[in-house]
Image (cartoon, rainbow, N blue to C red):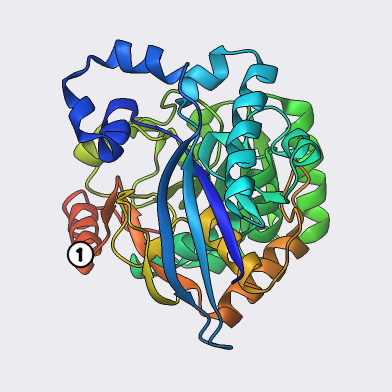
Amino acid sequence: MDNFAFIIHPISFKADVVRKYPAFKVIPDRILRFMATLWPPVYISHITGIRSTATGKEIEGWFYACPLSPDQMLAMPVESVYRRIEATVNKAAAHGARIVGLGAYTSVVGDAGVTIASRVPVPVTTGDSYTVATALQATRYSAERLGIDVPGATAAVVGAYGAIGRASTLILARNVARVVLIGRDQARLAQVADLARAEGRAEVVTSTDIADMAQADMVLSVTSAVDTIIRAEHIKPGAVVCDVSRPRDVGAEVAEQRDDVLVIDGGMVAVPGDVDFHFNFGFPPRTAYACMAETMALAMAGRYESYTLGRDLTVSQVDEIRELAEYHGFRLGGVRSFEREVTDEHYARTLRGQAARGQVPAR
């Protein structure tokens, strides 16, 4: 049977560890973190029931964990982190996995999978291509639900010169009126801006000040920051903010302070078939992160190749994996906000918040 594995790791450290080991709830966080630096890779669960709607083909997979948090990965020498990720991939390969997805921070550390791919016996992918596709789908869907005129809108990309930010910028430039690129390195922003102007119809401007995202009706935030960087005062009234980053770029207090804006986590992907992950990673049943779904779709197609690696993600890759995934029955299965599914009531509440403040989005 065609198959895959996917590497996860703790984000909210203790809460995520306790998902797998409930008895560890009594252990102090600092001790758990120290223990994690010594743990070998951890087998999490067997994934079953994924079935293509186009071909009827079924695949299986496995979750493995690299037991380090993002802040630990940043604090450690990059070579040490590589060795931990490499060990996890090797353990999955020894189990029989034919392609391995690098999840969350394991996909961005160092050179974003390039070194890992050169050292392990199976192909790996970061899943960033399908992450871009679904994040943009979710952002557009939510913007339209709130009455935003997407072709006439201003979009901002925070972290615009990273792999996801760059590809997202090029696609947005084809679909909106204006794009604001935000990051810390003006020279790198300028390079992406030139590409975006050639790619699409939008006016493209750059900024090193995150406060300039307040110009945008739609925001995509895709940085590798460990701490939150987007606060309530940074967001335009009536805007949609898609926070793809893990850990989050948007502080949780934004949801409490700004009932007139909608912060989403990106798209949930509905997985075809009667999938059972045999592990609760916080999503509704039969849905997955886009990076997971990219790995699944490649396995479904028998494409055992290192599909998305490094920082040079292309628009053609995004388009190709979206089409491949949709062919096999993967689709946008909903939108989440701070780990909770966005319902019709969420959209209605946001519209009421805008009305109460006398705000009207770009229409």
Between 316 and 176, the residue placed more toward the observer is 316
Quadrant in which the N terminus is drawn = bottom right
Give the amino acid type for the residue marked by disc 1 in the picture.
Ala
Between 305 and 282, the residue placed more toward the observer is 305
Q: Name the residue located 81 percent from the left edge and 49 percent from the top edge.
A: 195
Q: Which residue is mark 1?
A: 348
**Is residue 268 positioned above or below 257 on the image?**
below
Q: Name the residue located 47 percent from the left edge and 16 percent from the top edge.
A: 37
Asked whether, in this view, residue 348 is left or right of residue 12, the answer is left
Residue 20, by quadrant, is: top left
**Is residue 183 positioned above or below 344 on the image?**
above
**Is residue 225 positioned above or below 135 on the image?**
above
Between 62 and 343, the residue placed more toward the observer is 62
Asked whether, in this view, residue 279 is left or right of residue 121, the answer is left
Is residue 270 visible from the viewing direction of this image? no
Q: Name the residue located 66 percent from the left edge and 55 percent from the top edge.
A: 99
Give x and y (percent) for residue 80: 64, 17
Give x and y (percent) for residue 36: 42, 20
Crowding near the residue tagged with mark 1, few <14, some 14–19, many ≥20 C-alpha atoms within 10 Å: few
- Check disc 1 and report its element: helix, strand or loop: helix
Give x and y (percent) for residue 64: 48, 43
Give x and y (percent) for residue 298: 65, 66
Residue 363, by quadrant, is: bottom left
Is residue 313 visible from the viewing direction of this image? yes
